[in-house]
Structure formats: C-alpha cells, structure tokens
Image (tube, coloured by chain):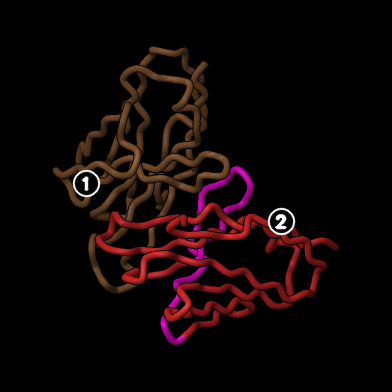
Amino acid sequence: RKEVEQDPGPFNVPEGATVAFNCTYSNSASQSFFWYRQDCRKEPKLLMSVYSSGNEDGRFTAQLNRASQYISLLIRDSKLSDSATYLCVVRHGGYQKVTFGTGTKLQVIP
Amino acid sequence: NAGVTQTPKFQVLKTGQSMTLQCAQDMNHNSMYWYRQDPGMGLRLIYYSASEGTTDKGEVPNGYNVSRLNKREFSLRLESAAPSQTSVYFCASSEVAGSSAAKYNEQFFGPGTRLTVL
C-alpha cells in the first residue's frame, strides 16, 4: 500500500458545483497534514493545513479522520480558477519525513 | 522579496555530462530541500538540509550531491547525468525544522528546473 494515496481524477465539474477529494495515508503515526495546489507546469503552493478539528478557509474545508486514516478537501461554489492539481501531503516524523501524494486533477468547466 | 529562486529554468544534457542546479531563498529559512517530480510518482525528496552546514539523504539520493553553501543557497549537482534523471526538479525551503507547529512546516517551492537527459 502506498504511504499516501489519491484518486488521480480528473474530476470534471461545472462552475458552481461542490466537489470533494479524499486522501488516505498508511502511517498511523502521521502528525501533520496539508493540501497543496499545483497549477500546470508550476510549483506546488500551500492551500491549507489540516487540523484535527477540521478547518475552513472561504470556500475550502479540510477534514481529518484519524480513525480511518484519511483527509478530505471540500470545495464549494467551484470557480474556473480552481482548476489545478491538488496534492495531499503527510508528515510522519521529522521535518524530512514528508510524503506527497501524486495529486488529484480538478477541471472546472463553464 | 523573491521567495525561492532556481536556475536554470530549462536544461538539456547528454548522458554523462555534469551540471549544478542552483537554489536560493531570501526568507531566512533554516531548512532547504531538493525534490524531483515525475509523472505518476509525486514529489520525491532527493536531499535536504536541516540547517546551514548540514545535509542528509532523502528518498532518492543516488546520482546526486548537494552543497549548502550558506543559509540562503542550496545547490544540487549531477556528476554524470543519466536519462533516468530526466525530471522536473524543485527546491523548497521551510522556516523551522522539526517544529510541531503546523505553520512552520509549510514548504515554499521554487519555480522548478525542467531537465532532459538525452
């Protein structure tokens, strides 16, 4: 089993739709969780950290389920500008023990 | 404030040639990292430097060497390039190594170097 697994997609959704991605991780001792966004041929950028209690940033909501070992990202009212690849990132030890998922591609269509 | 800069942006090498990828950050970060990104593989850590003067191997260090020249700069060297090293290389930095505070683990990435080895 991969350390971090994501559905590669693509998820094709109409503008205004709500879309959710899940990411599963295998190491139960994982400590920190993040969602990064990567535009085509660009560098990854932090979208949001994922806290145990769940957290929201505008149209984006992140949740952590430690029992089932997954994190989720919910995007409400999708915009064309949300089209990108979303990377799930898990830290499971020291600062260097960070594993990136392969990403889920989102395409928001007019 | 440029963040993380990388040079060159693109490079084509022949098998056996050597080159150095340069990375610099102006955020006064302690930790710096080199990743490679290949289709379907995600980002994989090549080497990292927790602080000035220290470097350690990551997941895929074979065929690479690094130098933490000072707090700002962290270079990656390919001594004898191979086609398997064709990839996109990203340098990243973070503020505090090992901190449990989530924000200190945010990594800031450079724009990447697209390397092709023929």
Q: A2 or A59: nearer the eye?
A: A2
Screen quadrant of the C terminus of chain A: bottom right
Instruction: Give the letter of the chain under mark 2.
Output: A
- Residue B89 versus residue A42 in the image, above or below: above
x 45%, y 29%: residue: B8
- Considering every residue shown, the one lying at the far left of the view is B53
Q: Give the percent coordinates (x, y) of residue B23.
A: 35, 38
Q: CA distance from mark 1 to mark 2?
A: 40 Å
Amino acid type at circle 1 is Lys
x 68%, y 57%: residue: A9
Amino acid type at circle 2 is Pro
Instruction: Give the letter of the chain under mark 1.
Output: B
- Residue underneath mark 1: B71
Q: A65 or B100: nearer the eye?
A: A65
Label total for image: 2
In the figure, the shade used to draw chain B is brown
- Residue A17 versus residue A13 in the image, above or below: below
The magenta span reads A35-53
